[in-house]
Image (spheres, rainbow, N blue to C red):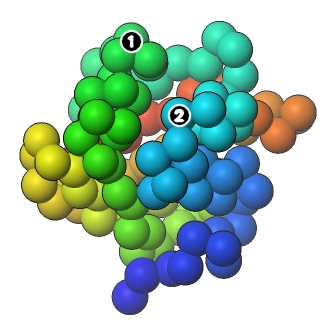
Amino acid sequence: MTIKTAKLSDPAVRAFVTAVNAGDPGRLRDVLTPDATMADDGSDRNLDEWMDREIFSSHGHLDVDNESDGGRSLLAHYRNDAWGEMVTRWTFTVEDDGRISRFETGQA
């Protein structure tokens, strides 16, 4: 059963998922620290290139199935035009200012 985005526990993660699903790069950038980093399937990636390719130009969308670690770890169905739909895991590091400094994703 999918968790509604508005019900996600962590405000930064909620804002991240909202921005991804809205296809809004400006809103997503606002929730990330200026020096944010990320990894996909265990390999660090260029954040801006990855977000453009995997989220925005390919219409990425997250449907969250489960959350843990206070809402900073997600199990979700992720789909985009490039890869179709897959079950993915997401973990987030949230700083004291409420912005995400790192996220890691990959197939679950």
Residue at the image point whose x is 40% and y is 74% from the top: 65
Q: In this view, does 41 lie to the left or right of 13?
A: left
Q: Toward the viewer: 89 or 83?
A: 83
Q: Quick one: label 1, few (<14), some, or many (20+) residues within 10 Å?
A: few
Farthest residue, direction right: 97
- Residue picked out by circle 2: 25
Q: Toward the viewer: 55 or 42?
A: 55
Q: Toward the viewer: 50 or 101?
A: 50
Viewport quadrant of the N terminus: bottom left
Rendered location of residue 95, percent (x, y): 79, 32
Q: Is residue 13 left or right of residue 86?
A: right
Q: Is residue 4 left or right of residue 87?
A: right
Tag 1's secondary structure? loop
Q: Is residue 76 left or right of residue 21?
A: left
Rendered location of residue 21, percent (x, y): 46, 57
Q: Are marks 2 and 1 in contact (CB under 8 Å)?
A: no
Rendered location of residue 62, percent (x, y): 39, 60
Dividing the picture into quadrants, the one containing residue 99 is top right
Visible residue check, residue 68: yes
Tag 2's secondary structure? helix
- Residue picked out by circle 1: 46
- Cα separation, mark 2 vs mark 1, equals 15 Å
Q: Which of marks 2 and 1 is nearer the N terminus?
A: 2
